[in-house]
Amino acid sequence: MSVSQIIILLLIGYIVFTIDKKQKNFPVPVILLLIGIGLSFIPYFSNVDVTKEVLYDVFLPGLLFVSAYRFSPTALRKNAGIIASLSTLGLIVTTILLGGAIYWVSGWFVDLSFVGALVIAAILTPTDPVSVVSILKQSSNDSKVADVVDGESMINDGTSVVLYTVLVGIFIEDRSFSMISFLSEFLYTALGGAVLGLVIGWLFSKAVHITHHKDYQVMLSIIISYGVFHIAEHLGLSGVLATVAAGVMLSWEFKHTNKEDHYQEALDGFWGVVEPTILTLLFLLIGIVTTDHLDFQYWSLAVIVFVASLVVRFIVIFGTTQIFQGWRQQISWKTASLITWAGIRGTVSVVLVLSLQEKATKEMDILLSLSFAVVVLSLTIQSLGIYPLSRRLSTNKKEE
């Protein structure tokens, strides 16, 4: 991708962010996605090559870090149980149930193996709050919903990558499945990444106070976000969870010290510019790269899979909250419905799909197209529906 193409994409993002005054009803990511699809038909952008490495190594660490350090430690501690359950055991159960549903339904349309169906399910499990959290905070009178959605998305981004990696190994390399091997690999990658992130995040959160020059402190935040990600990946750990853990540790430092209030202001100022810049490039590029995979004959299957993903997610969320008495009183079916709808598929799902492109087989082509189609449906339909749905459910709750 050339420098001139990047500048044009950033200009488009600037215009969209500037003129979109009703981001609640028309979230920016959806508009950027649709514009990206349109740009794919313009010859100047037809040669844009978006790789998994660009999205995963360059865009993702920054987005994860800014989301994590802004997340309230109080909210994380208050909702730690449900967030941990949904992003670990809940994620595995979701993958199994959705994979089973995809395998059963796909038999009416195309020949798809059970492991292939599980791979699609794993691609569709990570959630991407993007602009959804800010919309929820504006439209819903229950901050718990936004906190759970935001916290779950941070953790399940990492655990879903681990789960996907194991399933793809079985699918592509025809490896036999071993529960012990799976659990050991899952725990090593996930917990190892989280622990590494906490340790490095704690060390760097203390190092912040060595200098009082805010520009150097912001520079340190860049080192933390990208450094811990790539160290973890080099060690075979989850870079996603390492970056999230480091960001959460930095957030905890902000909460428990008032020494460097100006540092958080400088940090917010810097990452407040970086975040929309990354989002602009990310969703425009997703739109451009997606178009080639949307011209396929199984759109009816994609719609069924999309609906199934919502149904399975609701079952897992509502079922999980009913198991524990403390959550049963706090999470009603309406709240569970809102958390379900807010679980939009986005960045990580696209990264996982792109990692499959290197393997060209007939079944792989179906996996790619079907996954891309469901992600596009999720981004557009759920993003556009989140504000009216949250307003509707909030209104009903007040009337009750």
Image (cartoon, rainbow, N blue to C red):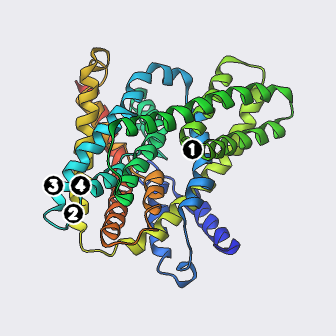
The residue to which callout 1 is attached is 236
Separation of residues labelled 4 and 1 (CA atoms):
27 Å
Residue ranking furthest to the top: 326
Q: Quadrant of the C terminus?
A: top left
Crowding at label 2, few (<14), some or many (≥20) Cα neighbours within 10 Å?
some
Q: Secondary structure at mark 3?
A: helix
Crowding at label 3, few (<14), some or many (≥20) Cα neighbours within 10 Å?
some
The residue lying toward the viewer, choosing from 331 and 189, is 189
The residue to which callout 2 is attached is 301
Q: Marks 4 and 2: CB-CB under 8 Å?
A: no
Q: Secondary structure at mark 1?
A: loop
In this rendering, which labeled residue sits more in front, label 1 or label 2? 1
> Residue shown at 71%/32% (left/top)?
264
Q: Amino acid at mark 4?
A: Phe
The residue to which callout 4 is attached is 114
Residue ranking furthest to the bottom: 43
> Residue shown at 67%/23% (left/top)?
253
The residue to which callout 3 is attached is 104
Q: Is residue 106 visible?
A: yes
Q: Amino acid at mark 1?
A: Gly
Separation of residues labelled 4 and 2 (CA atoms):
16 Å
Q: Amino acid at mark 3?
A: Trp
Mark sitting earlier along the chain (3/4): 3
The residue lying toward the viewer, choosing from 301 and 393, is 301
Mark sitting earlier along the chain (3/1): 3
Q: Left or right: 362 with respect to 32?
A: left
Q: Left or right: 62 with respect to 293?
A: right
Mark sitting earlier along the chain (4/1): 4
